Image: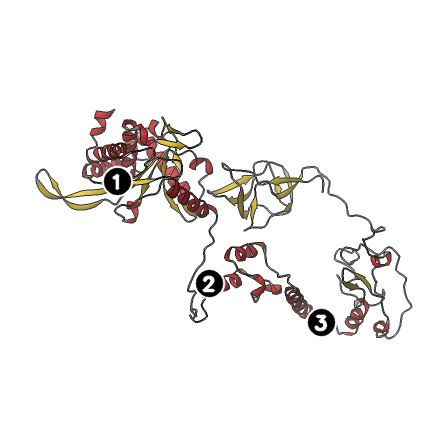
Amino acid sequence: MSDLQRFRLPDVGEGLTEAEIVSWRVAVGDVVGINDVLVEIETAKSLVELPSPYAGTVAELLVAEGQTVAVGTPIIAVRPVGAAVAPEQPAGPPAALPGVPPAATEVAVAPADVPVEPGLIGGPAPGGRTSVLVGYGPRTTSAVRRPRKANVDSLAERQVKPQRHGGFEIGRIVEPRLAEEADAPRPEPHRRQHQLAHARAATGAAAGAHGQVLAKPPVRKLAKDLGVDLRDLTPTGPLGRVTRDDVLGVGTASADPEVPTSTGSARETRVPVKGVRKATAEAMVASAFSAPHVTEFVTVDVTRTMKLVERLRSHRDFADVKVSPLLLVAKALLMAVRRNPGVNASWDAASGEIVVKHYVNLGIAAATPRGLVVPNVKDADTLSLHDLAAAFGELVATAREGRTQPEQMARGTISITNVGVFGVDTGTPILPPGEAAILAFGAVRAKPWVHKGKVVPRQVTTLALSFDHRMVDGDLGSRFLADVAAVLERPDTALLWT
């Protein structure tokens, strides 16, 4: 096994400490090349596909799907191309076990003339090898053929001297069991399989009674996350295994015995907090209680902006990209940042400094099935309107597929959250950690508005700006929000600021 190359879980993000194995893309025996995708993992930020650094044959998957492992843990073993597979060790004198007399390493062998089931002690194992008791090696002495006896019942009268090891007696029931099976009529193949299944189930139940509960690693992890003791469950899976449904049946039950549980469906559903959702929760708590938030609002007539959106959608230069009101809100924000650079900053507690960024990595909050992510467009302030639209389209598509990479969410400087797509008028967004401001863009609605001295229906929206009051005071935050509103109310204002 020394020729195997073990691939350890790498740090694919900034300060990643652990990740969950979501799905293996290879199986034992598969031939892989360098950079072939081996596994999909979920980090605290996103789903990531890990490529193979080795070329060879998959020898072993060291971690099961659903398990969370620390960075640096070996997760797969690959046998390099041309490496020889270690041959099977020939039968020879086994190493003596501590505290076990040498005679204990010998295994009782059934007489050659008595039919023995493959896999039983002394019987032929699949492939023609002699099956032995696990951990004791093959018998060191050659088997001596006994004279054939007419009655196989005499086997039951023969006793094998039991030898103790680890609190268990070895060899007491070996030959009596062979005698019983020799006397029993040979069952049909399908009946034999049925009997073996019952035997395995009984073995599993006995193991469970001694504290060894049968369950797959993902089920054990789910039970741990929900605080469920596997020993309290009644297994319903094959071979007496505890299944995911068994765990959820306990996790969703009412804790109050006087409150009846629903017979049709569960009254509660428990969702493990992990991966992206766990990281988001921790980040939001840290931000809310470390940065003093202030939120300001402004209601804007965006009728001219909405007309501009329609013109751009029909323009041939924008035929290959999606044009939305969010695109023009982002452009207005970028222009306001240029006039008010203090909102594009971060707080350096270690040095006691405010770091003003002269570039804009514009974050766009996106809701995904795995939780909220805020990927950002790097150097968004240098992009044309068309290129910004293309970057938004790629960013949103990747986020919806759950494929946003940690690098795409790192080093954001200011963000936008579009709550209007849900029909929400406004909100008080929480700052992404490390940023000084975030803008909430509400729903655009037709409302009565005073325009040119008359009350007429106009397209109106509400903007909300949350900012860190350590870096942004009320004057700076108000001027920045007013500039964003001015560009959205009259897009031609941008011509005066360029």
- Examine the image and state in which quarter residue 166 appears: bottom right
Counting from the top left corner in percent of width and height, residue 218 is at 55, 54
Q: Residue at x 8, y 39 (%)?
A: 453
Residue position marked by numbered label 1 in the rendering: 296
Q: What is the distance, in whole Å, between disc 1 and disc 2 at their CAs? A: 42 Å
Tell us which disc is closer to us: 2 or 3: 2
What is the quadrant of the N terminus in the image? top right
The disc, 3 or 1, on the residue closer to the chain's N-terminal end is 3
Up/down of 255 relative to 353, above or below = below
- The answer to whether residue 318 is above or below residue 427 is above
* Dot 1 amino acid type: Glu
Between the residue at mark 2 and the residue at mark 3, the CA separation in whole angstroms equals 44 Å
Residue 16 shown left or right of residue 422 in the figure: right
Q: Amino acid at mark 3?
A: Pro
> Residue 253 at x, y = what percent?
46, 65
- Residue 292, how many percent across, how many down? 34, 40
Residue drawn where x is 17% and y is 46% of the image: 447
Give whichever of 125, 461 is nearer the camera.
Answer: 461
Element at label 1:
strand
Identify residue for label 3. Answer: 187
Number of other residues with Cα within 10 Å of mark 3, as a class: few under 14, some 14 to 19, many 20 or more: few
